[in-house]
Image (cartoon, grey):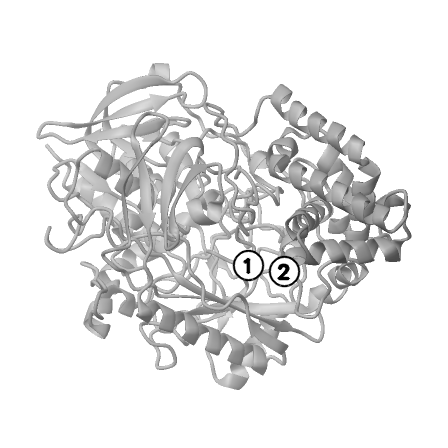
Amino acid sequence: MPDADSNPGNGDGREADVVPGNQGGRASRAAALSVRSLAVRSLAVRSLATLRAAVDRIIPADSWPAGWEGGVAEYLTVDPISADRDLAWAWPELISLAGRLDDEAHRAGADGFASLDPAAQDRILAVVAAGSGARSFDALRRVCWEGYYASSEGRHPAGLDMVGFRGVPEGVTPIEPEPLKTVAPAVVQAHYDAVIVGSGPGGGVAAQVLTAAGKHVLVVERAPYLRNDQIRGDHLHGKRNAVYWPTVGPGPGHPRVAQLPDGDRVLDGTDDASVYGLNADAVGGGTRIWQGMAWRFMPEDFSMRTLYGNPDGASLADWPVSYEEMEPYYTKAEWQLGVAGEEGGLTRRMPRSAGYPMPAMGTEPSRELLGAAADRLGWGWGPIPLAINSVPWDGRAACVRCAQCIGNTCPVNAKNGSQSTFLPRAIATGLCDLLPDAEVIEVRDGTGSAGVTIMADASTSPVELTVSADVVVVSAGAVETARLLLASGLGNDHVGRYLHDHRTATVLGESEHPVKPYIGPGHSVATLDHVHADTIPWGGGVIVDLMGLLPLTSAGQPAPGVPGWGAGHKEWMRGERANLFGVFAMGQEIPLPTSRVTLAAVKDRWGRPGAALRKDVHWTSQQVEDGMAVQGARWLDAAGITDIRRQGGPATASAAGEHSCGTARMGTSPENSATDPFGRVWGTSRVVACDSSLHPTNGSVNPTLTIVANAFRVAEHLVAEWPR
């Protein structure tokens, strides 16, 4: 879910350089080195010593190294290729700043900035920061935070040890799970019983169910197959906190148009993930890197329109299935996926036919603090259900409580997702061919068979494959499922409409003692007392403890009154930063027909139209946000947290967050929906959607368990009603 570690954006309005055909995300070595060497040569003229001196005033030496020695020098001048590529935007600003600083020093009668004493250097930096050099100064500060407080490309700078951050706990040796068996394009068959587009939770469940029924399936995943160690421990390129080119983004050649209030913005798959979209591209989809919150929707979530009516301009709709009908599939989802949870305060309003397969994750200080506060308020609360092994399960280890669960693969393969559950089971039958690094560019429907066109070996030497099938299951996520259907000319006018996600609010304050140490997996405790309650309108939302912030996030968002750089900032980072504590709330977003996915004029690498994304925010959704912020502040106040403040004010969720849904919503007729109650696209006989795009509304909790449960329902119905 979106959180305080989400992508802070590129900040400077740039778009990342695109290297056509390089899906792996690496510019050529020669090109990267030329960027760096030119920059260093330019700096040599203006004095590389000037830049070093400035860095060491942003992060001065004390008992811990100064910025340059502590990681910034390595970040700027040693060769990882990605640093050269990523920092192409920064070099002109840094070169300009070095010149400004030396000019100011010369005016003061000094030989250069580096020759001045620290106090004089600080005065010049303050003058430059407050004047026309503010942009260059901000670039310097940002590069300092990235170099000193962020892990990436194997770097472990001093700032991480200074604040006590370890991505993998001491004594834990990461393991690399056995890779899933894949097939080469040359052995893909001409016909399958089913082609499944996407390997995330919807596609993975479909593969498991269909192969168990004896169907031969081809699962097509557009992302290359990456090892777990390639998607872990990078605080600059991880999807949830990507500052630069995301490791599990789609890569270049996948443009989208964000239709923003201030105008359209064209982005490629290497750009700002917070605007482009937060869904992960990987074998296993988003479940490869999620934190695993595995909630059931409440019974009321399936009848929002009946309960609340449809406010003007909105498009609230009931689900064509009730909680009672979904309950057996929720139970199956929890046991087949593997969920650690506890019956009690968080389950009392959701009738259950079985308990959780694993006990809840162990407690931590934030759960104890907020649990006691909830008791004082008379609120129900409990440990969050997580699709993570709290004990050894399904032949894999228990969670080691690492500090960077969300956005990263698990170091011991304890995270339960499509890649570790549904896909392996399907492949083990011998009836599932998994084809990664391949993209379905067209879906065809017919009376006798369906089919797809695939571009395989997409990042190296693409080859076109034409495959027929009895049925095509489209499980590419709310944006890409809609785009593929629209580009294929399938479906009705409801396809692509009603794009929505969740509303969010973050409330922060200061605790007397640290209560959220760097211990995973992240969010730990929650209350559902403000979901479909009198306290917040329109269905309200869940409130959870704020997960521990990455050091880079904290550095860029210091508490009020903390200096923005220098000794005071560094002292706060290694001291009172640990007392920063808060809650995160997530609630209903009321869908609108104007919030939608359409086809853009910009073309992707195969000449197909990219997605255009528009997100409008209904006033009811804003009421949900504001109400959650109020209740979150009440919870913190009851816990004794001081200096309580709402972070950032009203949120404006990106058009394509990782919880996006609704673009092929289920319904009872073509007049009110894009698919029938079992995902068959209206107007087709052999094309079925099976992912979050089916959700008419998105509840007020993370939707993945509901995606999984509904996928079991859809896939089992498909087997029972197999097209002839």
- The residue that disc 2 covers is 557
Q: Quadrant of residue 442?
A: top left
User: Depth check: 188 or 34 in front?
Assistant: 34
Whether residue 176 is visible: no
306 displayed left or right of 293: left
122 displayed left or right of 538: right
Q: Amino acid at mark 1?
A: Ala
Q: Quick check: 722 above or below 393? A: above
Place of residue 66 in the rendered image (x, y in percent of width and height, measured from the top left): 83, 49
254 displayed left or right of 309: right
Place of residue 647 in the rendered image (x, y in percent of width and height, measured from the top left): 54, 67
Place of residue 349 in the rendered image (x, y in percent of width and height, measured from the top left): 35, 73
Q: Quadrant of residue 79?
A: top right
Q: Are marks 1 and 2 in contact (CB under 8 Å)?
A: yes
Q: Amino acid at mark 2?
A: Gln
Quadrant, the C terminus:
top left
Q: Is the residue marked by circle 2 packed among few (<14), some (14-19), or many (20+) residues within 10 Å?
A: few
Q: Earlier in the sequence, mark 1 or mark 2?
A: 1
Q: Which mark is residue 528?
A: none
Q: Which mark is residue 4?
A: 1
Place of residue 412 in the rendered image (x, y in percent of width and height, measured from the top left): 59, 42
Q: How many marks?
A: 2
Determine the residue positioned at 34% across, 23% down.
455
